[in-house]
Image: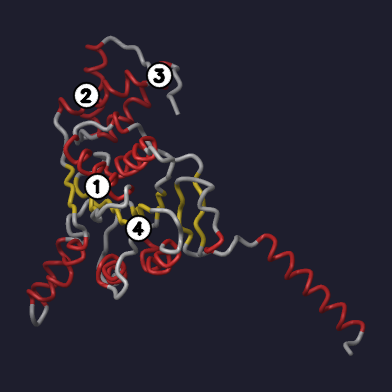
Amino acid sequence: MPTPSLQALLDRIDRLTAAVDRIAPPPPDEADLDAADCFVWSAELGVLEPVHRVNRVEIGLIRGVDRVRDILVDNTQRFAAGLPANNVLLWGARGMGKSSLVKAAHATINHQSADGSRLKLVEIHREDIDTLPRLMTILKKAPHRFVLFCDDLSFDHDDTSYKSLKAALEGGVEGRPANVIFYATSNRRHLLPRDMIDNERSTAINPSEAVEEKVSLSDRFGLWLGFHKCSQDDYLEMIDGYVRYHGLEMDPDTLRAEALEWATTRGSRSGRVAWQFVQDLAGRLGKPLKD
């Protein structure tokens, strides 16, 4: 029989353990996937954290990418309906709405859902890609369909986590779960820097095989949607759309002149630059923007 002092210590340990159990997050399999339509994968805790207010824009405000917008929405719609669909790589120019389009397409599909079923969007951070197989194991057990999303995906020198992504998408024994599709955005078409590919070509014993092994990651994406720098007309159309949507009033000629000056000072034209100008304009006019 424990001594009184030992028994007191054991009691304190039991109380401490119970307290930790109360504040610990639920096991992954017990996550409430009905709590939200969007989640962020916390690899450190091994849980899906709900996001109740998603940072996104209306799909109608994303201009200059009509063709890729329609392809992405159609692919997502087919997946939500249980039909065959492809993993998607959205690549190209910065600030042209790649990540915004993914989030907007998800919201559009759920808004159009006739049977009330909800497509779930799960974001995984680039640095957590090596935990993708563990996340896939959790998602495949759930009665929902998931768009697994990684923003700004790319790999640098000596980074081997891309092999985990290759296996999880198509190359593993189990393959991608039927209720999961993977969308990624990147500034790089092959997800790897050009000098990394060139280095493999110049130093490998068999250059063609070395390069093929590196770039084959992008082949796991059935759809490649390219985003390119916008024209001046597209840039001004983006600003006009934002101004109308948020009810901002300004003389059209003055608006055009200020918008072009803003783009000149930034050295580029893109959807992101257009949105930053509209935020500045709303602040100067003393007008709040719609949520």
Sequence-wise first label, 1 or 3 = 1
Compared with 63, 132 (above or below) is below
Q: Are marks 2 and 3 in contact (CB under 8 Å)?
A: no
Mark 3 closeness class: few <14, some 14–19, many ≥20 residues within 10 Å: few
Q: Which mark is residue 75?
A: 1
Q: Quadrant of residue 102?
A: top left
Residue 145: percent from the left, percent from the top? 39, 53
Mark 1 to mark 2: distance in Å?
26 Å
Kindly state the secondary structure of the residue where label 4 is placed: strand
Q: Quadrant of the N terminus?
A: bottom right
* Three-letter amino acid code at the position of disc 1: Asn
Q: Which amino acid, by three-letter code, is at mark 4?
A: Val
The crowd level at tag 4 (other Cα within 10 Å; few <14, some 14-19, many 20+) is many
* Precedes in sequence: disc 4 or disc 1: 1
Label annotation for residue 284: 3
Question: CB of mark 4 within 8 Å of CB of mark 1?
Answer: no
Q: Residue at x 53, y 64 (%)?
A: 29
Foreground disc of the pair 4, 3: 4
Measured as percent of width and height from the top left, residue 43 is found at 47, 63
Identity of the residue drawn at 20% across and 28% down: 235
Residue 97, quarter of the rendered image: top left
Nearest-to-viewer mark from 1 and 2: 1
Disc on res. 180: 4
**Disc 2 designates what residue?**
237
Q: Nearer the viewer, mark 2 or mark 4?
A: 4
Q: Could you tell whether 205 is left or right of 191 in the image?
A: left
